[in-house]
């Protein structure tokens, strides 16, 4: 079942932090997304990018959940208009990876008591 996105201001106004591939970030125009959010009256529409130490192919993204969902929409639009062929496979993988990161950040904001998909990878397992 798909994730039911909320319009709860407490969730949308929450903080989101996630790591996204640079290829996904370069495929969209962040400045336009921020401008459109500003025109729509979004409080704190900033999207902050930081280098991920030791991984030049990714960036940490910090923003409000609402802005993360706007990034997700932009990535979905790029993916919808990108031919699914071998030449575009790296970009499509980057877009999927970024989308999963946004969903995990959204999940964490929506239900902070639950372990999210993104955090699960960092929990030591006794099943190794």
Image (spheres, helix red, strand yellow):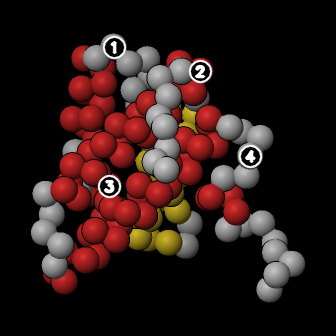
**Residue at x-position 33% and y-position 13%:** 41
- Can you give x and y, in whole percent of width and height, for residue 97 in the image? 42, 64
Q: Which residue is mark 3?
A: 25
Q: Which residue is mark 1?
A: 41
Depth check: 19 or 65 in front?
Answer: 65
User: From the viewer's perspective, is residue 98 above or below residue 7?
Assistant: below
User: From the viewer's perspective, is residue 125 above or below residue 34?
Assistant: below
Residue at the outermost top position: 41
**Residue at x-position 41% and y-position 70%:** 57
Among the two numbered marks 1 and 2 on one chain, the one whose residue lies closer to the N terminus? 2
Label 4 or label 1, whichever lies nearer to me, is 4
Among the two numbered marks 3 and 2 on one chain, the one whose residue lies closer to the N terminus? 2
Q: Quadrant of the C terminus?
A: bottom right
- Disc 4 vs disc 2: Cβ atoms closer than 8 Å? no
Report the Cα–Cα distance between label 3 and label 2: 26 Å
Among the two numbered marks 4 and 1 on one chain, the one whose residue lies closer to the N terminus? 1
Residues packed near mark 2 inside 10 Å, few (<14), some (14 to 19) or many (20 plus): few
Q: Which residue is mark 2?
A: 10
Among the two numbered marks 1 and 3 on one chain, the one whose residue lies closer to the N terminus? 3
115 left or right, relative to 64: right
Q: Is residue 97 visible?
A: yes
Q: Which residue is mark 4?
A: 114
């Amino acid at each position: 079942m798909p994730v039911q996105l909320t319009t709860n201001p407490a969730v949308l106004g929450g903080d989101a932090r996630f790591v996204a591939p640079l290829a996904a970030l370069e495929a969209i125009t962040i400045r336009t997304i921020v401008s459109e959010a500003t025109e729509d009256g979004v409080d704190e529409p900033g999207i902050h990018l930081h280098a991920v130490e030791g991984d030049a192919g990714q960036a940490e993204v910090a923003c409000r959940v609402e802005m993360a969902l706007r990034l997700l929409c932009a990535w979905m639009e790029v993916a919808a208009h990108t031919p699914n062929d071998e030449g575009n496979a790296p970009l499509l993988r980057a877009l999927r990876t970024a989308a999963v990161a946004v969903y995990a950040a959204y999940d964490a904001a929506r239900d902070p008591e639950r372990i999210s998909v993104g955090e699960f990878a960092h929990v030591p397992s006794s099943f190794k």
